[in-house]
Amino acid sequence: MVALLWVSWALLIARPPDRLSAQASLNVSFGARYTTTLVHDSIVSPFDIRLGIAPALTLVAGLPLEAPWTADGVLDLSYGLVSRHDQGGGVTAITHVTTLTLGVALRRDLRHGFSAAAGAGLLAYLPTERIGIFRDGGGPVVPMGTAAVSYSPPFAARRGLTLEARYDLHGFLTPALRTEGFVNSTVVHRVALALRYRLRGASGP
Amino acid sequence: MKQLPLAVAMAAGSLACHEPTLPPNHTPAYGFDLSGAVFHWPEDRLPVRFYADTRGAMQAYVGNAINLWQRQFLYGEFRGVLVADSGHADVIIVWAGSVPPDVSPDEGAPVRACGGSTIPDFAPSGNALQGPFHVSLTVLQGSGATPAQLAACMRRTVVHEVGHSLGLFQEASDSLLIMNYTPWVSAPADGDRRTVEVLYHTAPNVAPPPR
């Protein structure tokens, strides 16, 4: 929550657009996301609980600020299989889970078709069934921090296409894990590689 | 805009200030082997198929027991399901003798009004099962229990016997655990959870029955 407040403050101090003609943009991106270990535990032998490589769908609404800045509102969905990975190599499926994030970010256009963004938001785990570590639900909505780098070479920019690498981090702890005796949340890092397409609005850098 | 790097750094810092998660206590509360024989349902046999007597409230008791035991596992170790055909079941649970009335269980002080037994069907070699677990529930005569007290006894005893069919072959000495010789509580407790967790992460030396 503190992270969200800091970025909200940064957005507030940013100057509003100089011209009312500034055009909002709408982008959609689709890619794949890697997530680091959700839980590490040891019962007889150590094992990890991981979310597999998952498809990621992101919707970004951009509002131009003073050049070269843009304020982005980001809605992100990801869906993947949560599994137990034993030390011996065995993998046991637990359930599928959707992660939903809603955030804000500041993006800056850089040279040569690059742009970079940083922001914060809120993230929720939505399991498909109440079982295992999600037996008492996905837990509370948690704050997250995010950063992204985009690249759009001229030939792709003409077609509204951009390559994007998106990173975020958040804390993971479900009510069932708390009941089990876990006290602190695991810091989870996620990295997504995606292809972004401009649905409407101003062209990118 | 000059404050942006500071804001982002503060945001990242506030998220990263978590201490590493420490694994919780997983020490088992009691033994689970039967003279050295360790059994649990392997992953490729899940969900375990339970057949419950269709008379009285047995199906409700078994459904409750499956749900309670499933909730003890965090990491996908066990799943159970009720099946309609005893010929395709891994665990068969029936009444022995009379069928108690199907009434709401008394949630008050427990009364010892019933008994149960679970018989694993070991192959002569001793290192495999050759048929399903057979569980039977009995009404104890002369206990003086009301029908509701008897229902409560049956409900917790089914949870206890299903625990045996999961591979918890020993009885617990702690009366606050469902696997106590006489179950006085209605659900698996923390000690039961720790024990069954360790069992399902221990290499078994008894194979499941063939399907």
Image: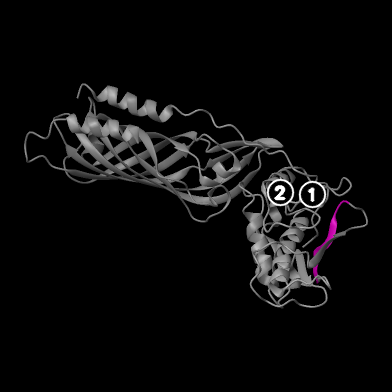
Q: Which residue type carries mark 2?
A: Asp
Mark 1 and mark 2 lie on one chain; the one further toward the N terminus is: 1
According to the picture, the residue beneath numbered tag 2 turns out to be: B192
- Segment tinted magenta in the rendering: B127-138
Residue drawn at x 69%, y 54% as measured from the top left: B44
Q: Which residue type carries mark 1?
A: Ala
According to the picture, the residue beneath numbered tag 1 turns out to be: B172
When the figure is inspected, residue A182 is found, relative to residue B134, above or below; the finding is above
In-front residue for pair A1/B140:
B140
Q: At which x and y percent is residue B140? A: 82, 70
Chain of the residue under the numbered disc 1 shown in the image:
B
When the figure is inspected, residue A24 is found, relative to residue B105, above or below; the finding is above
Magenta stretch: includes residue B133? yes
Magenta residues: mostly which secondary structure? strand
When the figure is inspected, residue A177 is found, relative to residue B42, above or below; the finding is above
Indicate left or right for B100 with A205 as reference: right
CB within 8 Å, label 1 to label 2: yes
Chain of the residue under the numbered disc 2 shown in the image:
B
Quarter of the picture containing the N terminus of chain A is: top left
